[in-house]
Each structure stands twice: as structure tokens, then as C-alpha cells.
Image (tube, grey):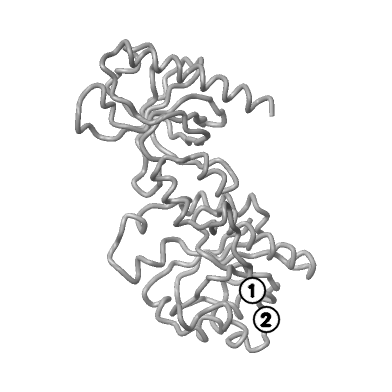
Amino acid sequence: MEVIRIHHPLDQRQIPSDPVVLAMGFFDGVHRGHQAVIQRAKEIAQAKGVKLAVLTYDHHPAIVYRPLTLADQKYLSTTRRKLQLLARFGVDRVFLVSYTGAFSAQSPQQFVDDYLVKFHTVTAVAGFDHTYGKKDVATMDRLPEFAQGRFDVETVGPVEETDRKVSSTRIRQVMQAGQIDEVNQLLGYQYRSTGLVVHGEARGRELGFPTANVLTPDNEWLPGIGIYTARLKVGAIWYPGMVSVGRNVTFGDHRPITVEINLLDFQGNLYGESVTVEWHHRLRGEVKFAGVEALVAQLQQDEAATRVYFKQLAAD
């Protein structure tokens, strides 16, 4: 997949001369709603015999318009992960634009003239609620007016799950609630985060359940507090295990949230490894136990449930 990084104003020399069908969106998470847009654009591209391209951005456009919120600083898919997913879904070319104040100051007509037309777009495809400027003006309904017959416009309706639209906002909400099973259903794949294995307090080792303590980036969403089944990727190998996102409340109050994964049947030194966590299934919430014995008994149950989960997954 070809990635063309663009900073406003556009340098036309960056842009290949061949025509494209262009899917547009920020695509945080590249969830099932986004996938519907990409799939429709892919179908049109194949019918026309041209490449499938995506126009997306390297950070939240909201950063330009308002003070930072938590949602503006965290991503369901960082730029690197988003590009991986776009490649997975068959995109040939990505126009990755740096969303700046100067870029946002364009009128809808300027954006169409200076970007969509110069990308050699034959059909522009986006979701029904996509905007490319002021929300009351830069709508998909008005895009044909700005296109002036130079390219076609295709609008994709919402994808719904349990009578509600699949959206990045909805996924972030259920992510914070720890409902990783629903997150994965809305995404259409298992959610992944990254991190670095660092030293912890070694309590897991003392309890007979050694853990890899994963220092996670501030800009990636994590599931809410709870115990989960997951896989950990080290190098090219995936290892199954169970993950705790929590404060280890059995050992005291007001402790920081940590991410600790106990790998099944693993022996080795993971300190300093850059890893990927693939989140699968929520086992339970965090519990404050009366003592170590009760905690160990619960961990044994969690391990048994984790083994059953991955055995069933392998059989499917």
C-alpha cells in the first residue's frame, strides 16, 4: 500500500496521475461502519478498473477547533495501526493529511478543488454524516454541488448493531466500561494495543502467577478495569494469557492502574520487549479479596477459564 503524507498546501508533484476512487474519513478504529465505506469504494474501484484510495488524517481534527479533551488525545487506532488496517482491507493508496489550522480554513469549494480534484478522484465515497468543513455546509448532500460534475459522489448509510449506529464514540464508551466483547463486535476484529514490558512489584511471581507488566502509551485506549483473556505478541510469536487492568486493590487503596498479563505455560525474560496486546474476552471485574489465599483461588479459576477460552477458539 502506498502512503502519501501531505502538509497543506498540497504539492501537486506528490500526487500520482492515475485516477482513483476515494474513500474519505478519519476512520479511528476502522470499525464496521468505516469498513462499509471502504468496501463500497472498493466495489466501485473494481468496477471502474482504478485504484482504491483513502483520504484520512494523522490526528483528530478536533484538536484544531477546541481545547484538548481525553477523547482527542487517545485513539482506537494510532496512525500506524490505522494504516495496517487499511492495508488489510485492500486499500491501494492513502493520502495522509496533517490536519492543521491552515488546512481547516479552506472553504468546502477550495477543499474540493485543491484536494479531491487534484487527487484525480473519479468517485468520492463517505459515510452519510461525513463533513469536510463547516458541518452545516460541507455535507455529503452538498458534495455533488461542489464537485461540479468532475467526479461522482456515493454516500454510505449507517451500519447498526442492536438498533444503534456503529461509531467510534460508541466504541470508546463500551471500551471504558470494560465491555471488550462488544468492542470487538463493533470493530469487526479483536482490538489491539501496544506497550513496553517493564519491572513491576513482582507480586504475581510471589503468588505463582508471574506477569509481564506492560507500560502502555498515553494515546491508546485501554479496556476499563477488569480481568480479560488476551494474546501477547513478542517478536513474531503470539502467546495466550490473562490480563489484569486494575489497581491491585487487595494490596491497598488508591494504587495506580497497571496492565499485567500472565502468559500460559511461558518461561522467559520479556523485560524491554515492545509488545502488542490483542484483547479477546472479559472474564470478570476487579475484586478486593480478604487475603492472598482467596486471590490465588480466584486466579486459579481465571486461568482455567482462560485455557477453556483459547481451547475453544482453536477448535472454531
- Vertical placement of residue 78 versus 191, above or below: below
Please state which of residues 191 and 272 is positioned toward the viewer in this rendering: 191
Q: Amino acid at mark 1?
A: Ala
Mark 2 falls on what kind of element?
A: loop
Q: Quadrant of the N terminus?
A: bottom right
Please state which of residues 126 and 23 is positioned toward the viewer in this rendering: 126
Q: Residues within 10 Å of mark 2 (few under 14, many from 20)?
A: some
Residue 214 screen position, x and y as percent? 37, 32
Residue on which disc 1 sits: 124
Q: Which residue shows up at 46% across the image and 25% down it?
A: 242
Residue on which disc 2 sits: 151
Residue 2, by quadrant, is bottom right
- Vertical placement of residue 158 versus 212, above or below: below
How far apart are the alpha carbons under marks 2 and 1?
7 Å
Residues marked 2 and 1 touching at CB (< 8 Å): yes
Mark 1 falls on what kind of element?
A: strand
Q: Residue furthest front?
A: 163
Q: Residues within 10 Å of mark 1 (few under 14, many from 20)?
A: many
Residue 278 screen position, x and y as percent? 51, 36
Q: For this view, does 81 lie left or right of residue 63? A: right
Residue 298, by quadrant, is top left
Q: Amino acid at mark 2?
A: Phe
Q: Quadrant of the C terminus?
A: top right
Residue 120 screen position, x and y as percent? 65, 76
Residue 19 screen position, x and y as percent? 70, 73
Q: Which residue shows up at 66% across the image and 73% down it?
A: 154
Please state which of residues 163 and 143 is positioned toward the viewer in this rendering: 163
Q: How many marks?
A: 2
Q: Which residue shows up at 32% across the image and 10% down it?
A: 293
Q: Earlier in the sequence, mark 2 or mark 1?
A: 1
